Image (cartoon, helix red, strand yellow):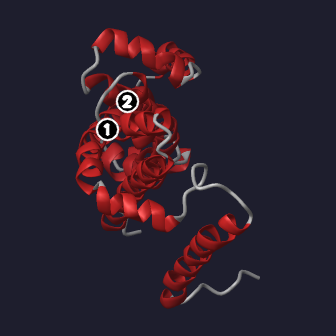
Amino acid sequence: MRPAPLSPQMAIALPVLGAASLLLAWQYLLPLLGVPAYIVPTPTAIFGVFQKNFALLMDNLRPTLIEALAGFVIGNLAAVLLAVLFVHNRILQATYFPIVLFFNTIPILALSPIIILIFGLGMTPKIVIAAVICFFPTLVNMIRGLDSASDNEHELFRVLSATRSEIFWSLRLPRALPMLFSSLRIASATAVIGAIVGEWIGSDKGLGALIIQASFNYQSDRLYAAIVLSSCLSIVLFCAVVLVERQVIKY
């Protein structure tokens, strides 16, 4: 028997309670255990960094936000378009999908310096890295979603004299949307990771650059503040995808 669903109040209260308990343990338990502040600063110390260096953090958040958003849009759009091409042309899919799979096996940390060499040190290589990270999961899930309709359903549309365009919009795409949005939820976090990895390789602006600078200067409280801010950015993008999904998928 499946457990009864939680009430809306409990669904909100329980995560808040879980986060509060972890923060209290972090604030009071770690110092009691002798963990030094230069390794793990307390939540109040990290909050103090947000108060003292708010302008600096926002100044570094802006380029990371732009890179992550642009990479998210470009990577997922390219994946969706290529998936549509692949499901309508099996020869094209058989020819190029193994090549796409090969590129996906290259670690992004090994690929990033090459992208930096090609596109320089500006914002473009960070966008490309974020797009590359988003691309493959969306491509695979979109192909699977577009192919998920049964033979009987395709036969029914052919009996009704539906065109390929009508089959795509009325059958293939509605079946693919749940998988597409599952990929977009994952991509909302990986796009931020891609932007930060790109900033690690070569940048003087952005949360990735701030994390590197704080690490080299032993500013652990600023390091943790940058990590918290990057996590908040991922959560905001994830929530935006969920809101769009609720508006698009009504079935």
Residue 10, numbered label: none
In the foreground, 32 or 241: 32
Image position of 182 (left or right of 240): right
Q: Where in the figure is residue 250, as x and y percent of width and height?
A: 37, 69
Residues at discs 1 and 2 in contact (Cβ within 8 Å): yes
As helix, strand or loop, the secondary structure at mark 2 comes to helix
Q: Quadrant of the C terminus?
A: bottom left
The quadrant holding residue 194 is top left
- The residue carrying pointer 1 sits among few (fewer than 14), some (14 to 19) or many (20 or more) residues within 10 Å by Cα, namely many
Identify the mark nearer the N-term, 1 or 2: 2
Which residue type does callout 2 highlight? Glu
Viewport quadrant of the N terminus: bottom right
Q: What residue do we see at 43% from left, 32% from top?
A: 135
Q: Amino acid at mark 1?
A: Gly
Q: Is residue 210 above or below residue 156?
A: above
Q: Looking at the image, which residue is at 46% across and 49% down? A: 227
Q: Residue at x 44, y 33 (%)?
A: 212
What residue is drawn where x is 45% and y is 32%? 133
C-alpha separation, residue under disc 1 versus residue under disc 2: 7 Å
Residue 99 drawn at (x, y percent) = 51, 14
Local packing at callout 2 (Cα closer than 10 Å; few below 14, some 14-19, many 20+) is many
- Picture layout, residue 107 above or below residue 165: above
Q: Position of residue 137 (x, y in %)?
A: 50, 37
Residue position marked by numbered label 2 in the rendering: 199
- Of residues 218 and 76, which is closer to you in this image? 218
Residue 140 percent coordinates (x, y)? 52, 35
Q: Is residue 159 visible?
A: no
Quadrant of residue 191 within the rendered picture = top left
Can residue 250 be seen here? The reply is yes
Q: Which residue is mark 1?
A: 206
Dot 1: element? loop
- Say whether residue 78 is left or right of residue 251: left
